[in-house]
Amino acid sequence: MSASRTFSFRTLNVFTTGSDDPFSGNPLCVFEDARGLSTEEMQALARQLNLSETTFVLPAGDDSATAQVRIFTPTYEMPFAGHPTLGTAHVVRDLLGTGDEVVLRVPAGDIPVRAVGDRWTLRAKAPAAQPVQATRERLAAMVGLPVEAIGAEPLLVNTGVTQLILPLRSVEDVRAASADPRLLRANASSLGDEALVYVWAPVDDEVVEARLFFTQGASAIEDPATGSACANLGGWFHLHGERRLRRVVHQGAQVGRPSVLDLEVDDEGQILVTGEVRQVGTGNFTL
């Protein structure tokens, strides 16, 4: 009989609304030291926890990054994701005593992350884009809306992972959206790396309301807070010539996890996503 192995983890909420609501933001589990875990075991642990993402910290292998990070949903590994990057950076700072600047090595590349207290900011990759192949009628049907609800140009944007950025006409349209899992799956090849649809509309000149839908099995799931999609929204603005742009993005209220993400496109076109991280638990898995 082989000896048991124990792996410590922490649970955190990322993009919280502040100290008065510990259950806001997007939940995350971070395994502190994943050495000795196989890819199959990482995937199994992510499936066991059934959070939107679970991350695993490993040595970077050289001095150009602080740590290597692998990110898993319950069904597959991701090249990059926003809330896991910020939450994992929070844990790495505490584990390694790095101070407020870390570089996390994910499959999509090295991601610089910095903190002011418990507020963490990631700098996304320069955006790439491609046109959407699906018609506006099909896009509208996928999110249960009339075609007139689609606003400006839909675009596939990649600042680390490709996602469909779908502008809607109004906040009321965002709140009325309801993803059709059958249509999402049928059109997966035109929706980006993960078949995600990010709908958004401006509340005013400073605030955006957004929702993100993706398929899991036979269902359509709504994510409480999506840092990678927020970065891709910054990419959407960047590709439309916007600079010196700041937006507060509200997400997650419809699933009982209100979340706040701060988006900036600076003078040089760099895309920055900021959010507050709160640790809420610790534990161990014995395998």
Image: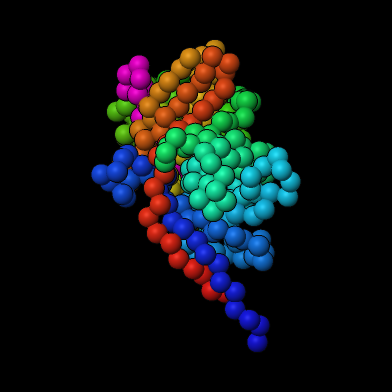
Residue 86 falls left or right of residue 19: right
Q: Which residues are magenta?
A: 202-214
Residue at image location 49% in from the left, 68% down from the top: 284
Residue at image location 49% in from the left, 34% down from the top: 121
Q: Relative to 106, say whether 206 is above or below.
A: above
Return the residue found at the far right. Answer: 62
Q: Can residue 216 be seen in the rendering of this structure?
A: no
Residue 33 falls left or right of residue 215: right
Residue 102 x/y as whole percent = 58, 40
Pick the residue in front: 226 or 193.
Answer: 226
Residue 40 falls left or right of residue 123: right
Pick the residue in front: 37 or 283.
Answer: 283
Q: Which image quarter is the C terminus in?
A: bottom right
Return the residue found at the far left. Answer: 20
Residue 61 x/y as whole percent = 73, 50
Residue at image location 29% in from the left, 28% down from the top: 172
Total numbered circles: 0
In the rendered image, residue 212 lying in the magenta stretch gets the answer: yes
Residue 87 x/y as whole percent = 48, 46
Q: Relative to 42, say whether 143 is above or below.
A: above
Magenta: main secondary structure: strand
In the rendered image, residue 241 lying in the magenta stretch gets the answer: no
Where is residue 239, by image quadrant? top right
